[in-house]
Amino acid sequence: MSNQSGEKRDTMWVGPDLGEGVRPALRVDTDGTVHAGTLGPARPDADRVVNLKQVRGPFYEVVDEGRAVPLAGGPPKVSSDAYRRGWTRVFGNKHTVGQA
């Protein structure tokens, strides 16, 4: 399928919701190769993300595609001073146990 500027783009047929936002999908590349898979909401652990533009009904044009952006900086840091202050505010100071 060509867009308004005449540039050929991949197309995608998106099926009905299978639950939790996951849908079956068929993608047709510009060279005619067909790929079957599923489409769902973007997640931090996703392999690829696509931006779609609806053409008509369940047919879409693939506008752009890329790899999912990894979470910056890795897992949350839970040993920071801010975390310790929050812990004390929520759970209180350490109690002395077993004083004689």
Image (cartoon, rainbow, N blue to C red):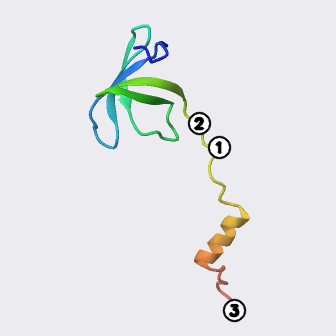
Residue at x-position 42% and y-position 39%: 41
Residue depth check, mark 1 versus mark 3: number of the one nearer the observer: 1
Residue 1, label in figure: none
Q: In this picture, is 39 found above or below 11?
A: below
Residue depth check, mark 3 versus mark 2: number of the one nearer the observer: 2
Residue 69, label in figure: 2
**C-alpha gap between disc 1 and disc 2:** 8 Å
The residue singled out by tag 3 in the image is 100
Q: Position of residue 24 (x, y in %)?
A: 31, 29
Disc with the residue nearer the chain's start (3 vs 2): 2
Amino acid carrying mark 1 in the image: Ala
Query: Which element carries disc 2, helix, strand or loop?
Result: loop
> Which quadrant of the rendered structure holds the N terminus?
top left
The residue singled out by tag 1 in the image is 72
Would you say 62 lies left or right of 96 here? left
Would you say 36 lies left or right of 8 here? left
| Of the pair 83 and 69, the residue shown nearer to us | 69
- Whether residues under marks 3 and 2 lie with C-beta atoms below 8 angstroms apart, the answer is no
**C-alpha gap between disc 3 and disc 2:** 57 Å
Disc with the residue nearer the chain's start (1 vs 3): 1
Residue at x-position 64% and y-position 71%: 86
| Of the pair 2 and 99, the residue shown nearer to us | 2
| Of the pair 51 and 77, the residue shown nearer to us | 51
Residue at x-position 49% and y-position 16%: 5
Q: Callout 2 environment at 10 Å: few (<14), some (14 to 19), or many (20+)? A: few
